[in-house]
Image (tube, helix red, strand yellow):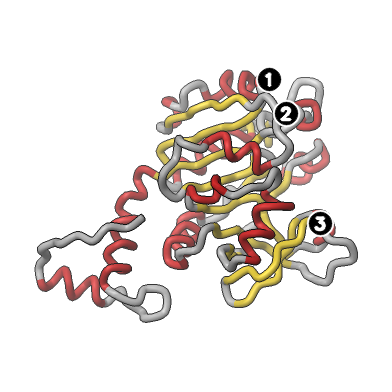
Amino acid sequence: MKKKISITISEKTLHDIDNIIDYIYIRNRSQAIELLVNNALGENKVAVILSGGDEEKLRVSKEEFRITVKVKDTTVIELMTRKLKEEGFKKVYLIARKKILNAVFQIIQNGSLFGIQFEYIEEKDSSGTGDTLKMIKGKINTNFLVVYGDILFNDLNIEELWKEHIKKKGMTTLLLTTTPDPSKKGVVKIEGSKILEFMQKPINPDIYLGFSSIFVSQPEILEYEGHSLEKDLFPSLAKKRLLDGYLTTSKVFKLRTKKDINLIK
């Protein structure tokens, strides 16, 4: 919900604000001021790491989970945390089951050593990524970043993804990359930046633009029904024209097995 306010501002500042208006994404002064305020408030940006589901399916070895396995000499969760800190995030919610939460806590603790606040949310049961994400309902009331707990994204410019989401004013903006094997991930039909259709692991696909396990969203996504983000919520948002895409050439590495880890090493 938006409220109308009255402010007093210098002519020079107003002139600078007017220069931001492009009449495409930013159509008037109100939108320009809102964009600038949102960027300034970016110091309080929040991220959510999804690592829910059966813990045994998230192991890469007897001792290690995908999120705690070491890439070279550093665990995945440490690399994630440092990257999020570098991109200006101040708070991170990790949603996972008990064994994974305990394993991550041994590494990150409350996040203070990394200059970031960590909050742990225990998932006891879920039927999909949508159920897992909804566990933050009531904790977030502004735009937030979501990253899956089995990826590495060190080279990604998250700030650009974030800015595009703010400009487009859609419900959710997915990070998209080209994929050589679209049958193994969610793929999209897109026009401009608007996603027209989202398909999870289609059979014999002819689309090679895929969802790369990172997105920015408004908190209203938590009100939508559906157990799975990929099978329920994203297709529903696409039909309503509430889903946008941001294409990047940066690599996002999926870490499901020891083989995946070794390829990065």
Residue density around tag 2, few if under 14, some if 14–19, many if 20 or more, within 10 Å? many
Q: Which residue is mark 1?
A: 99
Badge 1 or badge 3: first in the primary sequence: 1
Front tag of 1 and 2: 1
Please determine whether, in this image, residue 93 is positioned above or below residue 170. above
Question: Mark 1 near mark 3, Cβ–Cβ under 8 Å?
Answer: no
Give me the C-alpha separation between circle 1 and circle 3.
29 Å
SS under mark 3: loop
Badge 2 marks a residue whose secondary structure is loop
Please report contact status of discs 1 and 2: CB closer than 8 Å, yes or no: yes
Q: Which residue is mark 2?
A: 65
Above or below: residue 76 compared with residue 168 = above
Specify the amino acid type for callout 2: Phe
Badge 3 local density, few (<14 within 10 Å), some, or many (20+)? some
Residue kind at label 1, given as amino acid type: Lys
Residue at figure coordinates x 64%, y 45% from the top left? 152
Tell me which label, 3 or 2, sits earlier in the chain: 2
At mark 1, the secondary structure is helix
Report the number of discs.
3
Res. 60 image quadrant: top right
Position of the N terminus by quadrant: bottom left
Q: Residue at x 52, y 58 (%)?
A: 171
Q: Residue flagged by tag 3: what amino acid is it? A: Lys
Q: Which mark is residue 201?
A: 3
Q: Mark 1 to mark 2: distance in Å?
A: 9 Å
The answer to whether residue 242 is left or right of residue 16 is: right
Circle 1 Cα neighbour tier, 10 Å, few/some/many (<14 / 14–19 / ≥20): few
| Residue 16: percent from left, percent from top | 21, 72
Q: Please state which of residues 138 and 27 is positioned toward the viewer in this rendering.
A: 138
Residue sitting at the far bottom: 23
Q: Residue at x 67, y 24 (%)?
A: 124
Residue 104: tell me if it is visible. yes
